[in-house]
Image (cartoon, rainbow, N blue to C red):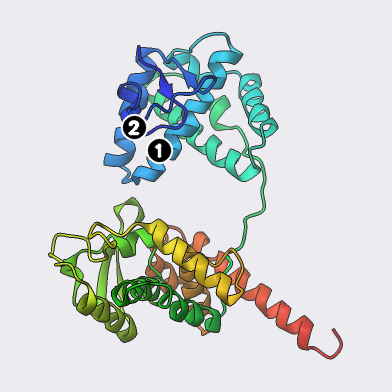
């Protein structure tokens, strides 16, 4: 029976990964029954719930770490029924272990959510009572507020990234990508997922985001113009079924390159380390809200499944108002 790697993808469920990433102390041998359960569970996460590959990998890493701890803590692997009806003391021991090794309350809450999801799925199939695990409370943590750029900061970022490219078409490409992040509120994966068929950009773009959810996003004329300028300068044939944004060798543009060029730009501009590609999406939402945008409409534009996720931007707006108040009020 092949072990499962701690830092792994779903492919590792079928045996040791080709990258050789198995490390001492980070590998656990699972029973064939549990291994099969993990494989089926992850397949259903993708097929039925539309979870992205990154989400599935994170869930799988969390659950495998949990099973690895139980194997050591209890002196052997558990069957499915045993995993579902785990005593509360064992679950608390795992949570204490995770905190002791430096896991933040936020990360532990996410890991517990993964464990609960897998346990509920196992209990349903094993006919076991998973009340103890499912009723466990996640540690409290303060949600971090998004760190958007100012309106001028966002525009400066767009202008400056264009100056980083060694070739005109590369600068035009980077400017077009960052403009889409800010002008349309796209995730970097969504922008780089566009194909040649998207050009010329329509007035309304259909985007498939997290969980394979589709949304319609209006495209500003400036965004259409920036993409058109990039396409005009790009030396590669942008076929309809090929990536729209290309690297210097003609392959699909890697998101890390956009992160790197934004890092160079923010250092020149004196912006904080939070000025990342995702911060442009935060800026999109915050600036719309500040201008009187409807929260429900912003939720739809961002593709958030829950309004509570979008409501975090109201806290950002309120924090900025208080900052202005404290600086400007004569009695402050």
Tell me where residue 22 sits by quadrant: top left
Tell me the quadrant of the picture where the C terminus can be found: bottom right
Which residue is at the far bottom? 330
Of residues 267 and 303, which is closer to you in this image? 267
The image quadrant that residue 230 belongs to is bottom left
Examine the rendering and report whether any part of residue 243 can be seen: yes
Q: Position of residue 199 (x, y in %)?
A: 19, 74
Outermost top residue: 75
Query: Is 193 displayed left or right of 142 in the figure?
Result: left
Query: Along the line of sight, which residue is nearer the eye, 110 or 246?
Result: 246
Task: From the image, tell me which residue sits under label 1.
Answer: 57
Q: Determine which of the numbered discs, if any, sits on residue 10 in the image.
A: 2
Q: Secondary structure at mark 1?
A: helix
Q: Position of residue 217 (x, y in %)?
A: 32, 73
The answer to the question of whether label 2 and label 1 lie on touching residues, with beta carbons closer than 8 A, is yes
**Quarter occupied by the N terminus:** top left
Residue 192 point in image, percent of width and height: 31, 62
Badge 1, how many Cα within 10 Å: few under 14, some, many 20+?
Answer: some
Q: Residues within 10 Å of mark 2 (few under 14, many from 20)?
A: some
The answer to which image quadrant residue 107 occupies is top right
Q: Secondary structure at mark 2?
A: helix
Cα distance, mark 2 to mark 1? 7 Å
Which mark, residue 80? none
Residue 293, visible in the rendered structure: no
Q: In the image shown, does 232 or 95 lie closer to the viewer?
A: 232
Q: Residue 302, position in %: x, y?
A: 41, 66
Left or right, residue 267 beside residue 232: right
Mark closest to the chain's N terminus, 2 or 1: 2
Q: Residue at x 51, y 65 (%)?
A: 263
- Tally the numbered discs: 2
| Residue drawn 36% across the image and 54% down it | 210
């Amino acid at each position: 029976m092949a072990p499962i790697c701690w830092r792994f993808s779903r492919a590792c469920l079928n045996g040791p990964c080709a990258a050789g990433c198995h490390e001492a102390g980070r590998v656990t041998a699972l029973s064939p029954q549990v291994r099969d359960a993990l494989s089926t569970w992850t397949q259903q996460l993708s097929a039925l719930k539309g979870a992205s590959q990154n989400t599935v990998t994170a869930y799988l890493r969390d659950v495998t770490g949990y099973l690895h701890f139980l194997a050591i803590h209890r002196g052997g692997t558990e069957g499915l029924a045993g995993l579902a009806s785990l005593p509360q003391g064992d679950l608390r021991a795992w949570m204490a272990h995770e905190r002791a090794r430096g896991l933040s309350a936020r990360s532990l809450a996410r890991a517990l959510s993964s464990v609960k999801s897998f346990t509920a799925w196992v209990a349903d199939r094993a006919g076991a009572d998973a009340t103890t695990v499912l009723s466990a409370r996640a540690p409290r943590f303060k949600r971090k507020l998004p760190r958007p750029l100012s309106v001028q900061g966002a525009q400066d970022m767009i202008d400056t990234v264009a100056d980083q490219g060694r070739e005109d078409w590369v600068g035009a490409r980077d400017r077009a990508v960052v403009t889409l992040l800010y002008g349309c509120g796209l995730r970097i994966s969504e922008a780089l997922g566009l194909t040649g068929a998207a050009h010329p950009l329509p007035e309304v773009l259909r985007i498939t985001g997290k969980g394979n959810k589709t949304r319609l996003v209006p495209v500003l004329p400036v965004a259409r113009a920036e993409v058109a300028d990039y396409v005009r300068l790009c030396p590669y044939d942008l076929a309809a079924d090929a990536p729209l944004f290309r690297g210097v060798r003609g392959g699909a543009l890697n998101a890390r390159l956009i992160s790197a060029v934004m890092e160079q730009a923010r250092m020149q501009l004196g912006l904080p380390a939070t000025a990342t590609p995702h911060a442009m999406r935060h800026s999109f939402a915050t600036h719309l809200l500040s201008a009187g945008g409807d929260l429900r409409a912003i939720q739809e534009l961002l593709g958030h499944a829950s309004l509570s996720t979008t409501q975090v931007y109201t806290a950002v707006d309120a924090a900025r108002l208080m900052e202005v108040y404290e600086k400007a009020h004569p009695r402050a």
